[in-house]
Amino acid sequence: MSAKLNLTLAAGDYEILRPLKEGLVKADGIELNVLTGADSATRHWRFLRNEEYDMAECSGSSYIVAKDRDMPFHALPVFPHRRFRHGFIFTNTAAGITEPKDLIGKKVGVKFYMATATLWLRGILENVYGVPHKSIEWFAELDEDIAFTPPEGLTLHRLPDDKSVETMLAEGELDAVLHPDIIDPIVKKDPRVGRLFPDYKAEEQRYYAETGIFPIMHVLGLKAELVEKHPWVVPNLYKAFDESKNMAMAKMRNPRLVPLAWYQEAWEEQERILGPDPWEYGLTEANRHNLETVVGYSHQQGLISRKIPLDDLFLPVSQGRKRGKFRT
Ligand SMILES: O=C(O)c1ccc(O)c(O)c1
């Protein structure tokens, strides 16, 4: 008889989750079925709109909105996806945008308004570079993860379904685009499209030196029903996610694994700048600052009604008692 609880987890196909996916790390009492087939936007929608999975790597931004609306979700302080975002502000090269303030009064496209990458970018543009989010006319390509009424003074249009912000940017119908992914015109080296910060790596490193923030994009969402029925899963899952990450970080130090000539140097550079574990889980001091910043941005941008305390956003994950040696 298997007394284990079968649970589905939808997530990206990430190295730090691979030991869990491959069963090298197990959560006590749980059999995990890890689904990595959906792209991020689809996964978030399926989890938040349809509750298709017991747990999912979920948009940090949309999760914060879900909590503000008392929707039936919780989260572990597990952050499978982080990314610096200065390199994701794309511009039409004929639009005359050479510095952040040139975005004021412009038409800017987004995949959708609530997406975590764009939440961070609007916050950074407003608070670091003096570009108020309401000074921009916004155009969204997709429906929001959670339906949202733009607050007073915010202009947000939903584009018709046959329009793509990437094409509109290249053709000059939009002046700029903020996007979670590298957009097609950049991949194809279309000369009509560039970046606001051509040397974005330097900008991102300066941002990190000033703030200590490696922006958290995604959290590990759980259906409330799961936590209510089986509260014991919370510390067991957290421990397993952490073990999986630690195992992956140790494995990935091997420079033979990745087909990049200068992978070792990239790893060393990351360690020098970001320290030994930039992917740290838990409500550590650095993660609290990171998350409080993004909750503040969400509130500033009218996505949520109150600055939700982190202890309301994340489940406590302590094992309760420090475990001693096993004795027979
Ligand atoms: O975090 C998000 O909200 C989000 C949304 C859409 C994406 O394509 C994505 O990669 C992330």
Image (cartoon, rainbow, N blue to C red):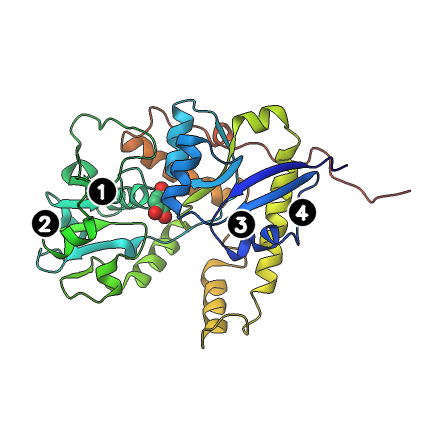
Q: In the depicted view, which residue is nearer to us: 130 or 36?
A: 36
Q: Residues within 10 Å of mark 4 (few under 14, many from 20)?
A: many
In terms of sequence position, does the residue under pointer 3 or pointer 2 come before the other? 2
Give the quarter of the image for residue 207: bottom left
Instruction: Answer yes or no: disc 2 within 8 Å of ligand 1.
Output: no
- Whether residue 163 is visible to the viewer of this picture, yes or no, is yes
Question: Which residue carries the number 4 mark?
Answer: 26
Question: Which residue carries the number 2 mark?
Answer: 173
- Whether residue 284 is visible to the viewer of this picture, yes or no, is no
Q: In the depicted view, which residue is nearer to us: 210 or 7?
A: 7
Type of amino acid at the residue the image marks with label 4: Lys
Type of amino acid at the residue the image marks with label 1: Glu
Whether residues under marks 2 and 1 lie with C-beta atoms below 8 angstroms apart, the answer is no
Label 4 element class = loop
Give the quarter of the image for residue 61: top left
Q: In the depicted view, which residue is nearer to us: 33 or 44?
A: 33
Residue found at x 54% / y 34%: 54
Question: Which residue carries the number 1 mark?
Answer: 141
Instruction: Answer yes or no: disc 1 within 8 Å of ligand 1.
Output: no
Q: Quadrant of the C terminus?
A: top right
- Mark in the foreground, 4 or 3: 4
- Mark in the foreground, 3 or 2: 2
Q: Position of residue 35 (x, y in %)?
A: 51, 46
C-alpha gap between disc 1 and disc 3:
33 Å
Q: Farthest right residue?
A: 328
Q: Quadrant of the N terminus?
A: top right
Whether residues under marks 3 and 2 lie with C-beta atoms below 8 angstroms apart, the answer is no
